[in-house]
């Protein structure tokens, strides 16, 4: 079962629905205390559910990477500025969904165990990413490439988090 293939369903909504089911009683992720990962008992998830959540989380991060690359091309004048608004909006939406995706505390993929054991720091970094992406999206609504460019370095803090909490890519053979 792949959540993203359901019409009108985003990863964030799918994760919230699964979290509510696992927590028991319809609690959404937004109602979960942000200082700690959602109390999902991974041992109660099937292998397929775990793999699906990790896969969906990875796909979300791949999309963020693609949109970040496109935003870089827009700022550099390589891609048309007409894509600024939709690209920055997508980054803001996906940044929020990434926070929800990681809040499930489902280990795996390239996420290091330190993400869960240092949840306060990891979550703080996710919050900063969400806030930065929302700031970029608001500036993107104006259509001003220079305004987005002025905050881009401070707003997109991906590298700092990835250096601490993501395993490097394994070389392909």
Image (cartoon, helix red, strand yellow):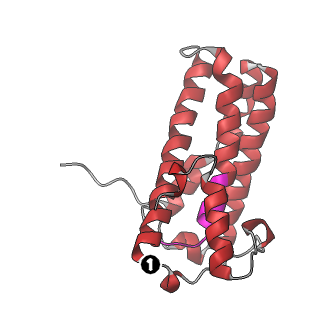
Residue 19 versus residue 67 in the image, above or below: below
Number of numbered discs present?
1
Q: Which residue position holds label 1?
A: 46
Percent x, y for residue 43? Answer: 49, 85
Percent x, y for residue 115? Answer: 56, 69
Describe residue 87's horizontal placement relative to residue 172 as left or right: right
Residue closer to the observer: 127 or 80: 80
Taking the spot 66% from the left edge, 58% from the top edge, the residue there is 13
Q: Which residues are magenta?
A: 97-108
Taking the spot 51% from the left edge, 50% from the top edge, the residue there is 5
Image quadrant in which you'd find residue 134: top right
Taking the spot 46% from the left edge, 71% from the top edge, the residue there is 50
Image quadrant in which you'd find residue 52: bottom left
Residue 50 versus residue 25 in the image, above or below: above
Percent x, y for residue 57? Answer: 52, 57
Percent x, y for residue 17? Answer: 66, 67
Q: Is residue 108 visible?
A: no
Describe residue 38's horizontal placement relative to residue 114 as left or right: right
Residue 52 versus residue 93 in the image, above or below: below
Residue closer to the observer: 44 or 146: 44
Q: Is residue 121 visible?
A: yes
């Amino acid at each position: 079962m792949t959540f993203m293939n359901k019409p009108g369903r985003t990863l964030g909504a799918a994760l919230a629905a699964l979290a509510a089911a696992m927590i028991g009683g319809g609690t959404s992720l937004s109602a979960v205390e942000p200082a700690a990962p959602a109390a999902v008992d991974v041992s109660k998830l099937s292998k397929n559910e775990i793999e699906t959540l990790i896969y969906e989380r990875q796909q979300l991060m791949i999309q963020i990477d693609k949109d970040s690359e496109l935003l870089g091309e827009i700022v550099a004048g390589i891609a048309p500025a007409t894509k600024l608004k939709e690209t920055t909006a997508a980054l803001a939406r996906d940044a929020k969904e990434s926070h929800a995706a990681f809040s499930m505390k489902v280990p795996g993929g390239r996420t290091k165990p330190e993400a869960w054991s240092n949840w306060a720091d990891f979550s703080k970094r996710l919050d900063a990413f969400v806030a930065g992406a929302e700031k970029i999206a608001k500036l993107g609504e104006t259509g001003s490439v220079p305004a987005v460019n002025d905050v881009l370095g401070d707003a997109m803090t991906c590298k700092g988090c990835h250096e601490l909490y993501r395993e490097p890519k394994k070389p392909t053979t």
